[in-house]
Image (cartoon, grey):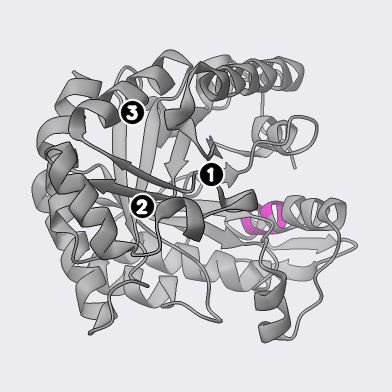
Amino acid sequence: MEFATGHMHPWVQGRHGRIGFGLEVFPIETPDEPARALLAAGELAERLGFDSFWFGDHPAWGLDCWLHMAALAMRTDRIGLGINVACALYRNPVLMARLAADLDNLSNGRLILGLGIGWDENEFNNLGIPFPPVPERQAALEEAIAIMRGAWGQEPFSFDGRHFRTRDALIRPAPRQQPGPPILIAGGGERVTLRQVAEYGDASQIGMFGLMSGDGTVGTVRRKMAVLDRHLAAAGRPSDSVLRTHFTGWLILAEDEERLDAKVRRMIPEGIEQRFSGGWAGYAVAATPDRAIAMYRSLVEAGIGYFVICTLDAADTETIRLLADAVFPAVAG
């Protein structure tokens, strides 16, 4: 189910010319009342002017994203509500279409639906579902998007795929946003994932680890944006029809280097390099506002127009406030 030539979601169109910032809080470092801390962070993000607030999807070991998005929808008025990102294989696509439509209506059209293929094999085992190879999970993602978009349509929708099937699905009430919530597809694979973004997505998301290390990684981002442009041209869509987003796994900010060193020692006693090594190297970024500004400016120059920035500690309001007060104005201005 591909888009008509020139498709551009209204959410993407409304962001043209503006750099956006979203906050994700995954409160695994917040031991006391994490649900309350999560919702408080979402309310703070709205007060501070963040464009969106994001929730992770790890039902086997994290807070449920749909339940807590619904709770935050009732406690906020403006801020976008995003999933970063829902695994397309964790739920039947018709069920996810229902959840997305209900949340979009409950929030008055604020849902941003992030989708991916999943990566945590242990979580698949926890949920008692198979963990297929990457190509099969990628194919399942395409089928899931086709079914969700079909179920949001005007007529009953049937689909018989290799991974999913449905007969006469029709979600009512339909989502508030039309033709549905914007779909963000996560991943930077140049042959398949970025092609899927071009054919089915409204936003891309890449999360490059170690961006503080120099121009090489930013050059990789620039190359991936060029690859996405080629896929968009092949799909008959203009380059600006997809919003390019970037995910920072765990950002820790403090006003100066001395305070930053003390904060990192308190939050990660074993050290960032020891805790995040191998494939996770660079997942956490500790910086002063000046260094964070330089990092995000370099990504804007490489083609990124929207940032989703995560803190694993909902109580780290210092990072949240420094982002809003110091980093945003310097990068977006």
Q: Which residue is mark 3?
A: 14
| Residue 140 coordinates in the image, percent (x, y) | 79, 58
Closer to the chain start, of discs 1 and 3, is: 3
Q: Residue at x 80, y 67 (%)?
A: 164
Callout 3: helix, strand or loop? loop
| Residue 144 coordinates in the image, percent (x, y) | 71, 58
Q: Are marks 2 and 1 in contact (CB under 8 Å)?
A: no
Residues at marks 2 and 1, CA–CA distance in whole angstroms = 17 Å
Q: Which of the two marks, 2 or 3, is nearer to us in this view?
A: 2
Horizontal side, residue 319 vs residue 299: left or right: left
Q: Is residue 52 above or below residue 267?
A: above
> What label does residue 36 carry, if any?
none
Residue 129 within the magenta-colored segment of the rendering = no
Note whether residue 173 is visible.
no
Closer to the chain start, of discs 2 and 1, is: 1
Residue 148 within the magenta-colored segment of the rendering = yes
> What label does residue 310 carry, if any?
2
Give the amino acid at mark 3: Gly
Q: Which residue is mark 1?
A: 184
Q: Residue at x 23, y 84 (%)?
A: 32
Q: Are there few (<14), some (14-19), or many (20+) residues within 10 Å of tag 3?
A: few
